[in-house]
Amino acid sequence: MIKENTIVSYVDPKSPVSEAYRVLRTNLRFAGVDKQLKTIELTSTGPAEGKSTTAANLAVTIAQAGSKVLLVDADMRKPKIHQLFGLVNGKGLTNVLANKEDYNLCIKRPLAGGPDVLTSGPLPPNPSEILSSESMKEFIERVGEDYDMVLFDTPPIGVVTDAAILSTLVDGTLLVVASSQADKDAARRAKDLLEHVKANIIGVVLNKLGNASETEFYYASEEEIRGRKRRRRANG
């Protein structure tokens, strides 16, 4: 059973929150100017900013539009996706990468009409090394061919290097920032860390706005962010 009040896009698809996720889904369709974005990671500046909830709801919303979607829990330190969907975190991504198991045998389908889900699997002692392995590169290539969209939930970029590593292997990165708790300097550092490895930052999801719930957010594309900076410089 899915965790209460988390997968809003599934339990209450007509809500304003669900509509906001549909807007994000639409924006992502137009985010890839030069090429289609098929593999996207979601990370955050720090813990408990709603990153996993955003990833789960976005995956459900994209699947509801008829796309074949895979949601991968690539957080091998504190995985959350299995909890949100009420799944047992038995076999998962670590089995696929470390043991060379067929990922199709580890896939779960918890929701009718929803995304396929690959949980993290057993927690390894060396997450960063596994994510940067040749097995991970091969896995991303394969699922990129098998699915219309693949979303990776990763640890916070401001805490460990995992998200920075994965950002070099996927088509784009979404940065989730909780407005009510994220420090501005921390958010700036997170963006700098991603830019340092030449990650394709396709947008920022700003959630927890004031008294809003965790799943209410504002999406700003990287192009919009650059435009605001140009206007600020022009206005002195």
Image (cartoon, helix red, strand yellow):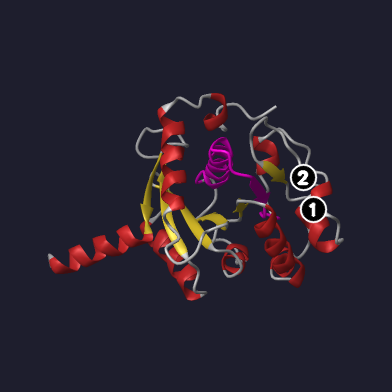
Residue visible at 40% across and 29% down? 16
Q: Amino acid at mark 2?
A: Ile
Dot 1 and dot 2 residues touching (CB under 8 Å): yes
**Quarter residue 140 falls in:** bottom right
Give the camera-side residue of 43 and 68. Answer: 68
In the rendered image, residue 79 lying in the magenta stretch gets the answer: no
Residue 49, relative to residue 39: is it above or below? above
Q: Amino acid at mark 1?
A: Tyr
Residue 34 is situated, as x and y percent measured from the top left of the image, at 45, 67
**Mark 1 and mark 2: span between their CA atoms?**
6 Å
Residue 161, relative to residue 178: is it above or below? below
In the rendered image, residue 73 lying in the magenta stretch gets the answer: yes
Secondary structure category for the residue under label 1:
helix
Classify 10 Å Cα crowding around label 1: few (below 14), some (14-19), many (20 and above): some
Q: Which residues are magenta?
A: 49-76
Residue 211 is situated, as x and y percent measured from the top left of the image, at 37, 33
Task: Return the mark for residue 103.
Answer: 1
